[in-house]
Image: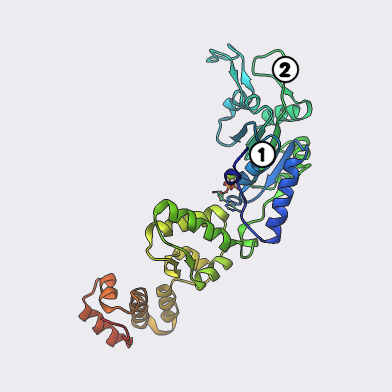
Amino acid sequence: MKHARLQPALIGEHPSMVALRQLIARVARSRANTVLIYGETGTGKGLAARMLHALSDRAGAEFMDINCAAIPAELLESELFGHERGAFTGAVSKKEGLIEAANGGTVFLDEVRELDHVMQAKILTLLDTRRFRRVGAVSPIDVDVRFIAATNKVLLGEVKAGRFRDDLYYRLQVIAINIPPLRERGDDIFLIAEHCLAKYNEHHGSRMRHLDDDVRAVFRSYQWPGNVRELENLLERICLLEDGERVRIEHLPARILREVGRAPAAEAAAATALPERGFHAATRAYQASLVTQALARAGGNLAAAAKTLGLTRHALRHQMAKLGIAGAGSD
Ligand SMILES: Nc1ncnc2c1ncn2[C@@H]1O[C@H](COP(=O)(O)OP(=O)(O)OP(=O)(O)O)[C@@H](O)[C@H]1O
Ligand SMILES: [Mg+2]
């Protein structure tokens, strides 16, 4: 028996994700032998393909993950279909292809729109006849595989532009699964974030457990063009580089803050001060925001704040007096 915990899982309670998991389970158990997965980069297409395999009665056989964009076109045919000895220069022995090796299992054609016209035709023939020929072979081989194709672009555009065969498109399109972008999944962002933090805490020995409220607000309004992968990478970086148990707004890259209209405090202060009050007032606003940020990060501790600013405690006190910043905190 397979261990349940080894099964890939798409985390999420948003209605679209609950429906997606149900659809995947249903398609997995069906007799459908082609499935097309759409989704922006990093949305979980690879994960969905693994679930389709793991939940099917093909789970005992191979799952072949083939990235059509990563294999040079001239090698792809013999990689997928295999070749006979002497089929071409360099074919010193017979070789089984990935499709044959996946017999009884699943072939995942990632970035399927990268297939050239010749390969599109060969794949279509294979889908229609369930047989193929190794390169240089005379007789065909029967094979029983489920094909899952994935793309991050709507394929119809490629069909209209003449880059993707319409007959293959319609064949793949029979069962199409759409994975929504992360920005449309509501509070799932937090569920996935917590899952990531737990994972990275374990890997990196960090203790990050909570997201501050303003971080949560930023996460909800940011667009996440790189979707779940972008969220994972961001949180991994924070677990590696920052201390403490809370993800704080200062931990987020300025680029993300700017995109949600929250310029990092110092820049915002300087930018608003500049047009109205000129250079000196803008510089003062910038200095003030550096000092208040340093104090906030240091929990009001003057010595610690001075250290992050590269000032002596005396110089920091002087700046605070000059800028009119009250020093309620400890030394
Ligand atoms: N709903 C989810 N719950 C938990 N982890 C997820 C979820 N969706 C994606 N992931 C994780 O996010 C990362 C990206 O997912 P995946 O590689 O499947 O995306 P993709 O759509 O195939 O991306 P690409 O278009 O770049 O190939 C993986 O580490 C995956 O495990
Ligand atoms: Mg992928």
Q: How many numbered discs?
A: 2
The quadrant where residue 169 appears = top right
Q: Which mark is residue 140?
A: 2
| Residue 33 versus residue 255 in the image, above or below | above
Neighbor class of circle 1 (other Cα within 10 Å; few <14, some 14-19, many 20+) is many
Q: CA distance from mark 2 to mark 1?
A: 26 Å
* Residue 109 in the image, given as x and y percentages of width and height: 64, 36
Distance from mark 2 CB to nearest ligand 2 atom below 8 Å: no
| Residue 321 versus residue 11 in the image, above or below | below
| Residue 31 versus residue 296 in the image, above or below | above
* Residue 44 in the image, given as x and y percentages of width and height: 61, 49
In this image, 237 relative to 116: left or right? left
* Disc nearer the start of the sequence (2/1): 1
Residue 158 visible in rendering: no
Q: Residue furthest front?
A: 1
Residue 36 visible in rendering: yes
Q: Which mark is residue 53?
A: 1
* Residue 260 in the image, given as x and y percentages of width and height: 54, 68
Quarter of the figure that contains the C terminus: bottom left
In this image, 214 relative to 130: left or right? left
Q: Nearer the viewer, residue 31 or 150?
A: 31
Disc 1 residue type (three-letter): His
Q: Nearer the viewer, residue 157 or 101?
A: 101
Disc 2 residue type (three-letter): Pro
In this image, 316 relative to 85: left or right? left
Q: Residue at x 57, y 25 (%)?
A: 75
